[in-house]
Image: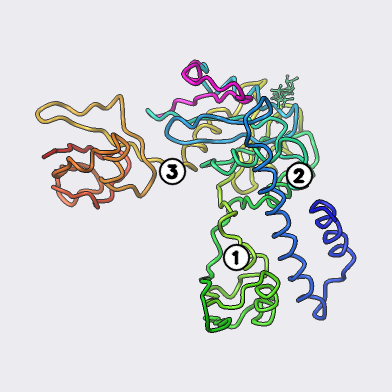
Amino acid sequence: MGIVDKIKAIEEEMSRTQKNKATEHHLGLLKGKLARYRQQLLADEAGAGGSGGGTGFEVAKSGDARVVLIGYPSVGKSSLLGKITSTKSEIAHYSFTTLTSVPGVLKHEGAEIQIVDLPGIIYGASQGKGRGRQVVATARTADLVLMVLDATKSKHQRESLEKELEAVGIRLNKEKPNIYFKKKETGGVKVTFTAPTKTTLTEDAIKLILKDYRIHNADVLVRDDNCTIDDFIDIINDQHRNYIKCLYVYNKIDAVSLEEVDRLAREPNTVVMSCEMDLGLDDVVKEIWYQLNLSRVFTKKRGIRPEFGDPLVVRNNSTVGDLCHSIHRDFKDKFKYALVWGSSAKHSPQKCGLNHKIHDEDVVSLFTK
Ligand SMILES: Nc1nc2c(ncn2[C@@H]2O[C@H](COP(=O)(O)OP(=O)(O)OP(=O)(O)O)[C@@H](O)[C@H]2O)c(=O)[nH]1
């Protein structure tokens, strides 16, 4: 039986099995198997699709952050890209013959944010269909997923996209489960809970799943009493899981009632807009910026005013060392000390080393040996 058939068989068995106390371990085991087979399916395709040719899907990563657009056809992805991104001339530097997606660049607050429209996405990727695998690989590299939805359509569109992403290991707006897991050479499986579990994730369930994964020696510490069997399966498949923020964008609000717009706008992590009427586009950009949580750092040369027009953009929680790295790979080796002005500095300026955490809008002078 091929993997696709195995996956189908497990999905069918799961939908046939009633959820109750007696079946919960069995269901957990099936979920674990399903995760493993899906993994295998994506990995097999990686081998098959990686040999160049004209069917690949690659996007050169550039800019300070990457946002991927995900949505059904005709929801308005191209319209949105056209409105918020600048010309795509940057892409001329890259000569990918297999490039099938041209990223747009959103310039905001001095940062360059790459926005990639994933073609056709993902539909059926988890079942091994089409070029899904390469598309999924690109989605994994995103700092933010922008799910573009059609306000005139049912909520099924959102659910089915979420399900597809879920099936390939992409977790939206979710933290990595708080479970410590370490495989060992000997000593058997040791399971500890810091508090009695509130879910079906019991010691027996954990042991059963690990046995199915042929893991016979491991330490497991469940630190959160709300962790579920699915969370535990995510932890054992950790290399293939990505926890990515998602912003839901409802387009075409010009075509629905005000009550409906109001209802949609109140959903968490959601913005509403109309590309056609130019409504809400600023909010979309603002929200992208907010979700990416980037920091702008202005560099300053001795005796000269800082260059406020052209910040260096780094991830939130970055250090002076990260800043050096973003200037040049080897810059850290030459680094002597930094002077920092701004909210991260205890006094202005503060003399700092590589480990100093910088804040948004700090001004930094770097001194080299
Ligand atoms: N009513 C309304 N229609 C819109 C809006 N934005 C886009 N459309 C229409 O929706 C259709 C699809 O828009 P596109 O931007 O091509 O959508 P897409 O998601 O890029 O579609 P694909 O290229 O097929 O993936 C076009 O006919 C647009 O005119 C909007 O805000 N309101």
The magenta stretch spans residue 207: no
Q: Which mark is residue 263?
A: none
Q: CA distance from mark 2 to mark 1?
A: 22 Å
Q: Quadrant of residue 52?
A: top right
Whether residues under marks 2 and 1 lie with C-beta atoms below 8 angstroms apart, the answer is no
Query: Is the CB atom of the residue marked by disc 3 within 8 angstroms of ligand 1's nearest atom?
Result: no
Residue under numbered circle 3: 293
- Tell which quarter ligand 1 is in: top right
Q: Which residues are magenta?
A: 89-109
> What residue is rendered at 21% in x and 38% in y?
364
> Quick one: quadrant of the C terminus?
top left
Whether residues under marks 1 and 3 lie with C-beta atoms below 8 angstroms apart, the answer is no
Between residues 74 and 187, which one lies in front from this camera angle?
187
Going by the numbered disc 2, the residue's amino acid type is Gly
> What residue is rendered at 13% in x and 26% in y?
304
Residue under numbered circle 2: 128
Going by the numbered disc 3, the residue's amino acid type is Asn
Going by the numbered disc 1, the residue's amino acid type is Ile
Q: CA distance from mark 3 to mark 2?
A: 34 Å
Q: Left or right: 133 with respect to 155?
A: left
Residue under numbered circle 1: 236
